[in-house]
Image: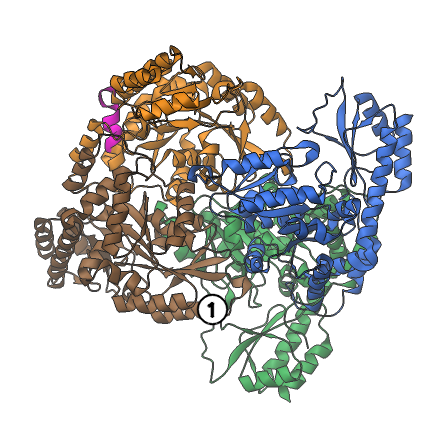
Chain colours: A orange, B brown, C blue, D green
Amino acid sequence: MQFSSDNWAGASPQISQALVENGAGFASAYGTNELDKAVEARFSALFEREVTVLTVSTGTAANSLALALAMKPGGIALAYREAHVIEDECGAPEFFMGAGRIEPLDGDDGKISSGSLGAALKRFDPPFLHHGRATALTMTQSSEVGTVYRPQEISQLSAMARDAGLAVHMDGARFANALVSLAVTPAEMTWKSGIDMVSFGGTKNGCWCAEALILFDPSLRENAEYLRKRSGQLFSKNRFVSAQWMAYFENDLWLDNARHSNAMAKALAEGIGASDHARLAWNCEANEVFMIANRTTEAKLRTAGAKFHEWNRPAFLKENLAGDEAVFRLVTSFATTSQHVSEFVEALNA
Amino acid sequence: MQFSSDNWAGASPQISQALVENGAGFASAYGTNELDKAVEARFSALFEREVTVLTVSTGTAANSLALALAMKPGGIALAYREAHVIEDECGAPEFFMGAGRIEPLDGDDGKISSGSLGAALKRFDPPFLHHGRATALTMTQSSEVGTVYRPQEISQLSAMARDAGLAVHMDGARFANALVSLAVTPAEMTWKSGIDMVSFGGTKNGCWCAEALILFDPSLRENAEYLRKRSGQLFSKNRFVSAQWMAYFENDLWLDNARHSNAMAKALAEGIGASDHARLAWNCEANEVFMIANRTTEAKLRTAGAKFHEWNRPAFLKENLAGDEAVFRLVTSFATTSQHVSEFVEALNA
Amino acid sequence: MQFSSDNWAGASPQISQALVENGAGFASAYGTNELDKAVEARFSALFEREVTVLTVSTGTAANSLALALAMKPGGIALAYREAHVIEDECGAPEFFMGAGRIEPLDGDDGKISSGSLGAALKRFDPPFLHHGRATALTMTQSSEVGTVYRPQEISQLSAMARDAGLAVHMDGARFANALVSLAVTPAEMTWKSGIDMVSFGGTKNGCWCAEALILFDPSLRENAEYLRKRSGQLFSKNRFVSAQWMAYFENDLWLDNARHSNAMAKALAEGIGASDHARLAWNCEANEVFMIANRTTEAKLRTAGAKFHEWNRPAFLKENLAGDEAVFRLVTSFATTSQHVSEFVEALNA
Amino acid sequence: MQFSSDNWAGASPQISQALVENGAGFASAYGTNELDKAVEARFSALFEREVTVLTVSTGTAANSLALALAMKPGGIALAYREAHVIEDECGAPEFFMGAGRIEPLDGDDGKISSGSLGAALKRFDPPFLHHGRATALTMTQSSEVGTVYRPQEISQLSAMARDAGLAVHMDGARFANALVSLAVTPAEMTWKSGIDMVSFGGTKNGCWCAEALILFDPSLRENAEYLRKRSGQLFSKNRFVSAQWMAYFENDLWLDNARHSNAMAKALAEGIGASDHARLAWNCEANEVFMIANRTTEAKLRTAGAKFHEWNRPAFLKENLAGDEAVFRLVTSFATTSQHVSEFVEALNA
């Protein structure tokens, strides 16, 4: 009953196997060999246009590079108040940006509202030297609380940001989970909706270590490559990530993994929603479930062996919690089994 | 006949296999699980004292973190003129240091001389606000030109630097090659010779991606962990590196790989030394061979299929090159075979 | 009727005169001559203990240096939501901190509440690598909205912050105005109330350019001097600021200027409070008055020649504004005359 | 007999007087009032084209801003080995550049040679990600050793740098001294010779505090203003510098000061050149004289009350010093008198 996080799983067997198969032979280093190029072609096919692919070591690095690419002196990135770039990256985005700032935006269900974005943009219009200037908007898909921006929502926010001259970034640490949830194409969820840059995550969805920054504007490539190298993020044996990417996309492994993960989350959410001992904090739209339960129930679950984290009650959770209730996060992955889920629900109702 | 670089090889089969074997099951993320702890214990045993192990994605990151840890406002790191931190890291050390500077030192055979270090230290003593202040000394073992510092040399430089209040770092991207060349222990080559921090590289010696910063001073751990996280260098599924480390040390794979690599280099050097068509630029002490040859010989070798890089003639190469002679670097690795070597020597003498 | 800002005034005649008198003769540069030392002694007498005085070019630089001094990797400074360091310094504090972050706190009347500070400190206790860590608390005295922290308030916030290991900084751009408002000593308002560092401003109170960072902990001096030099903030002819400081303190010019300025603000506030055409947003405690008025009144005042800025309605202003009312800021200085004030009140009531 | 530095002098009486005259009345802050605009117009007239003028607090800040403006990720500035930006700014340029690097160039007489520049440019052509990339060339006029680049020299270096895509900066801390030495116009010495940016210094030539970065490319203004504000370098009462600039240019005070200063240096150099007890290290071309003398002579001069600094023997000083000879720097200023000079020469020959 392991629901701590999707990065507690190991790797899909196909991913590890790809490393075995690619271990022999010589290939040029630093992302310049045939396999590396094949990966870029594969991503371009996926996104239905030529893209730049910059493999990095972590999602934090991908997000930070993206915001750094958009940075200007005095620059400010706009992000959801509880976004990973604010809460969980220890200042890496500000470090990569060269002392930039991230301003928090609000909205319901863990998503930036157009009203909050509009108010922030207005503050920097006309520009006033003393305030700094907005340079980028970043949104997380699926969001930190397991919800998903609809393409129309993305388009609306992107258009507002672009009109004000901002670059628009998507933190896709759980890109695949959002994609299969929406049943749209990668292109529709990104550049066709106004996205300029994507942090494309594979690690949480069955890879060992596969994160990339995807750029739709080829003119950004040069600066991006220097920024990556200068942050110690250019792997020498880059092909070990490329091999993972190839296996990830082969036979739609990535979509299968995400569908499985989302299905497990849905089953879990249904079990919780139907229980008398807990309820859902909000709808589950990807592979994260947020459960409200009291301490007695929590203790019962932990005693039964369930693993999960308590979640700080998010700012947008307007509903008051009763008595000693708290919010708990449950995350599923490719490695979650139906048995994990049914055991959890049984323990909950025991 | 692939001698371009030791990072053009793939991975030892044992390394890839370890990833297959560790792929199943759940384990806590971000370097906190049992395997991660076992790695730290393994390194402590290796170094005969308790050490802090910070896995990062690249040697550049390990070096940069080390220099950042030693940084103070106005700080300056001292390094050999042609050190990797100066020539090949695109400013990453300065970036991690928060706008520090690296001052070049000189010496023969790619190694810092005590005279050059002494002159640099004298310049900052007494301290003068306008100059900045020296905060760290870094030396590369084995060096960028394949030579190796003797323990007495390390001790001498370290003592001078420590007396002046500097931290002392070893860039051990090719740590194993130097170690087996000297036939000393890891402890003797590092902290027993005055080293405070080591960039310990596994990638060039048979791993896919295994680099770590080793700290001998436990009081540095806290800042080091924040610096690593803030630079986007904390792997979520860190166990994928830990699994490599465990396989790397098991049954002395790492020493065997390094001995093989050095032996191949030695054979290559002997072949070149005995040839009428080329000569050695200096002695080969690890797994890199530097050959002086003219353009005709170079063309002959390339036509025969040999792969290698021309090397900028280093500053310390006092000997004049004749006519159209140039310097070429040949690197061996665990994957180099005797056949590669003998083919190369044959082609050279053809 | 000039109420735009206290930095729209020129300089007190005594300040300019001091520059004339000190223009001749040679003196060592970079803050090392007798006059510079006399200034440090003068400040030490003022604060009743030995202090370190670092003259810089702007209040922004003083604040930024202070937060940089307290910085650790992953560090976060805590400040009032509408503090100058957040709203009006274009990211300078983050830049000096080396990519630090400033987290906003809340409270009434433009002052940090102990509840808001407590909640922020709790978030970083126990420390969690991914969040970063709180390193400094900064409060503005007098505040950005013209209110003043009582010594007990300062003591309470400082004690909370110190218990959590934070350094405590006071942004004293209007130090003198707060001091005469409270009728306490500089020591009582600062280190006796738990303050570690003060940005001591003279520019807004009659100097041309006189800002200094005051440190109560002598062990910070060395790093502070390197940080100042490295930010291009060490004046060569530093004595031109020292001469201003000496004139500033001579015969209590600074206190007289602040008393005059506060008295003008008080008269202005009384006139507004007694008017049927406007009202005070909150109490005036130093030299800034915040007036609520509708657009008709605003237009009338501007037509009459009054100069002042509209103010973004602060977050803590809970009272709803009626109709087309807005908030306006009026600032007085040593150069404000009773006639300016009475003309303004007449125009308001016309 | 005060020859320590030109920043040991105070200010020309006209400069201080201008501050007295401008002390009354209100004017908008942060460089936006009429006097500030008049200064920009005055500089534009001086340079015979529209220029952007950014007043900052120190020459270090002006140089650092210039190099930051030219910076790209992985960027490297090229400077003379003993340039002020390398030796005397405590890492400020690297800090403003956001972790850039400065690479040293060589040449005779304290000036960059075209050979050294060519070699450096060649190293970055074609670009190689791992090395970083050259982004700016900076030269000091007059140089750190009192020599002066001829317009043809400036043009040659600038052309080489511009062809390689670099921005070209002149550190004009002693701009006026070079200008009157060459008897050319400001335009000829700068943009007509390929200069893009000038650090224009007034402090060393009779001002209290007057340094500005001059930009010839108007498209740089926006970023420059944000960079300046973000570094805490935007004076609130900026008119206190503007008043100095107006007085500085009025009736050619700046040229008169520089001519006087250079004449004093020339007289000093002639006295030293004619003496049996000392000799010139190289020609004096502006307001700095470098004297070679032995310790006995040095002691004699110091006993007689002469004030001057010993100078590190520069790298380009090929001539061997005899016995206990050393190099000493003597700097003249607007405040140096003929009596200082004759007393010094007398003491030398005593």
| Residue at the image position 30 percent from the left and 35 percent from the top | B237
Q: Quadrant of the C terminus of chain C?
A: top right
Left or right of A6 in this view: D53: right
Query: To which residue does mark 1 refer?
Result: B123
User: Where is residue C25 drawn, in percent x and y?
Assistant: 74, 70
Extent of the magenta region:
A243-252
In the image shown, does A301 or C200 lie closer to the viewer? A301
Left or right of D115 in this view: D19: right
In the image shown, does C249 or C18 lie closer to the viewer? C249
Residue C86 falls in image quadrant: top right
Residue C8 falls in image quadrant: top right
Q: Say what secondary structure mark 1 lies in.
A: helix
Can residue A348 be seen from the camera position used here? yes
In the image shown, does B37 or A29 lie closer to the viewer? B37
User: Where is residue A73 drawn, in percent x and y?
Assistant: 55, 40
Look at label 1 and name its amino acid: Arg
Tell how many labels: 1
In the image shown, does C223 or D229 lie closer to the viewer? C223
Can residue D234 be seen from the camera position used here? no
